[in-house]
Amino acid sequence: MKKISTLALALIAMGSLSMPASAQVNFEPVSTPTLESGWYQMRQVVGVTRTDISATAPRYVYSAETAKDGKYYFASDAAQKSDATAFVYVDNTDGKYAIKSINGKWGDFVAISSNTKPATYDITQMDTNNPTQYRVGTSSYWEDWSNWNYIAGSRNSGNARFEFSKVNPADNYDVYSVVATGDFNPKTMQITVTNTLDSNKGTKTVYNGGSFFFTKGTTVTQDNFTITEKGTTGLSKTVKIDATAKRLVVEYTLDDKENKYAALLASSKADIAKTGVGLPKAESKVRTTFDAAISAFESEQTYEKYVTLSEAQTAYYKSTDVQMPEDGKVYVITNVQQDGTCYYFSYKSEDKLKAVSDKSQAAQFVCRVVNNKYVFVNVEDGKYLVVAAINSSGTNNGKGYITEYDAQWTDLTLSKNSILSCFNIGGKRATSGNKQNGNFIVDKKDGAFNGWDMTESNTASYTTAFKLEEVSYPNTVTFNAVSDVEGVSNLATFSAPFATVVPEGVTAYYVSTADNRTATMKAITGKAIPAKTGVILTSQSGDAVTMVPATNETIATIENNKLGNSAGAEKTIAADDHAYILSAVDGQTAFYKGKVNTILGMNKAYLTLNEAGAPEAISMNFGGNVTGINQIVNAEQNNAPVYDLTGRRVVRTVKGGLYIKGGNKFIAR
């Protein structure tokens, strides 16, 4: 160490001269297994990407005034710094570390800067034979990177070594820390404080949590500092110098706090109450966290909890752990513009897909999930949705539908859109060019379709945001238990405007022949029921099933089917329908003659029989097992008394009439 002259010592005592640089920065390496929190000097003594670094030719780490590439603030030099830029702050929290520049910027495990303390890492004494040498980082490690003269890091830098020398800056400097307080969120806000006094021996620019190092005895005032801000819109501030604690305090207050608190709480409650497709799942962590933040803020309205709730709401909006469309569920697809304007997919006005503002004209689409992609079929007419291409390009002249399944066009991709509850919906849109795949895009001014690629694009003029609103639709089949036919436990009728898959555990039949006594059932071959085709479904379990649209399944060929259908709309039975409705009367399952003006529900089936002397009821024959009326006999073949369904005894029966004889129902012939 250089000797200090008597005159110099006298001047120091008088406050006219600062401690000489050589006395300030003497480097004395520590050798403890752990480093305590505090100020240090730091130098690299073993290099990896730089071979010119050694214990005799170290590189001294210092706090740089400006960052390399906007993110590296820890610089290095062969010369030892003689001012306060030589210092770094080491934070030890439960044996895990983070290092901070004097300007307040933290360095993460590869020395990239952040405004807040990053995930901690290790500072490890690696070799007992060299106890002063430490490795910095976890999985990736600090080093003077490839002659940058700045510290960075990589996975391959594990052999780099540093030494640390403990210092106490307060011995030689008046250290003023910069503290942003009050309604200040360091994650989203930043303050930049500049001081250009000659007595400032550290960096001229300091951020929240950083420190200025002034020559001892320097008098500073608020006017010596220039403060600029980012992210503080809507906040007011006061600035003061705390000379005793040596702090520059910038205190922020949220403007119109009461109303902002109320607005955030109200919108958060409205958001968490929403469930369904496109929204975070009920069991998702982001929903649980959001719900907890709402409860915490409601119980105590502090700025810290306001920030926590705001962040939780933002995370809720951005979450990709959302409920996706499901097999067999039916949805209205709605384009959502940034200002809330909505357009609904529709085929009603023209023979092509349109985005219309009248929700009553909206199409309803039944969903089928295929290999993590989504097929949507218009329930009204079985059209398969495809990306509506502009300029009549793409399949089917860009009409936005095709009539038969074709995976390359119909299998659509859904990705989460940044607008709450919305998706980007995209797929193949053209057969040539460099933008063959693209998302649906709807223009705000008129609902016209546009197109480009598969990226999200939300602007004031157009969006790729689409909400799927689930609606009720009768494609879930509920079975009725039957006990009057061998081998058949549960029955239902079904039809749909689109081809549907026969569910596992279910057998579908059509009526191949029918006469005045019996309707003969024939099981369909193939895995799918044709569109607008009435069928009888049987199930051993009786569990309800949801009928999903067919994609690449083999569709059965059905000829001479005697079953009519109400696919897509309720049906009012007319006299010339000659309709028989599947029913159970007093436990007897059969097709019973339908009364004129009876309303048959949507997506059902009924028997049609237009023959002279048509009876009141017709049995069902499943491969020899006859259901329904136990006996269809000539009522006059024995002398047992005969009764009508009201219990009155009759002398003569009418052909086709339904009667009771010997405790059994029968149809007279």
Image (tube, rainbow, N blue to C red):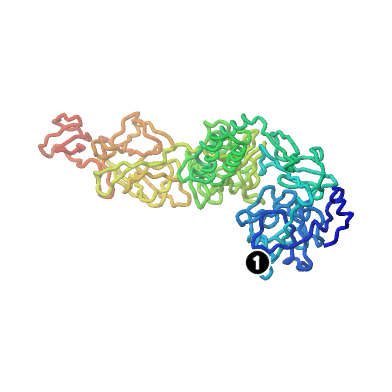
Q: Secondary structure at mark 1?
A: loop
Is residue 38 found left or right of 642 in the rendered image? right
Location of the N terminus by quadrant is: bottom right
Is residue 408 found left or right of 329 in the rendered image? right
Q: Is residue 77 above or below residue 506?
A: below
- Looking at the rendering, which quadrant does residue 233 occupy? top right
- Looking at the rendering, which quadrant does residue 241 occupy? top right
Q: Nearer the viewer, residue 85 or 11?
A: 11
Q: Is residue 49 visible?
A: yes
Q: Residue furthest left?
A: 639
Say which residue appears at 63% left-offset and 39% top-offset.
Answer: 463
Total marks placed: 1
Instruction: Give coordinates of residue 86: x percent, y percent.
Output: 78, 56
The residue under label 1 is which amino acid type? Met
Say which residue appears at 56% left-offset and 36% top-offset.
Answer: 297
Q: Nearer the viewer, residue 211 or 530?
A: 211
Is residue 461 found left or right of 285 in the rendered image? right
Instruction: Give coordinates of residue 396: x percent, y percent.
Output: 57, 45
Q: Nearer the viewer, residue 201 or 136?
A: 201
Q: Is residue 350 visible?
A: no
Instruction: Give coordinates of residue 142: x percent, y percent.
Output: 70, 60
Instruction: State the residue position of label 1.
Output: 126
Is residue 453 found left or right of 329 in the rendered image? right
Location of the C terminus by quadrant is: top left
Instruction: Give coordinates of residue 321: x percent, y percent.
Output: 54, 47
Task: Give the crowd class for mark 1: few <14, some 14-19, many >=20 residues within 10 Å.
Answer: some
- Looking at the rendering, which quadrant does residue 88 occupy? bottom right
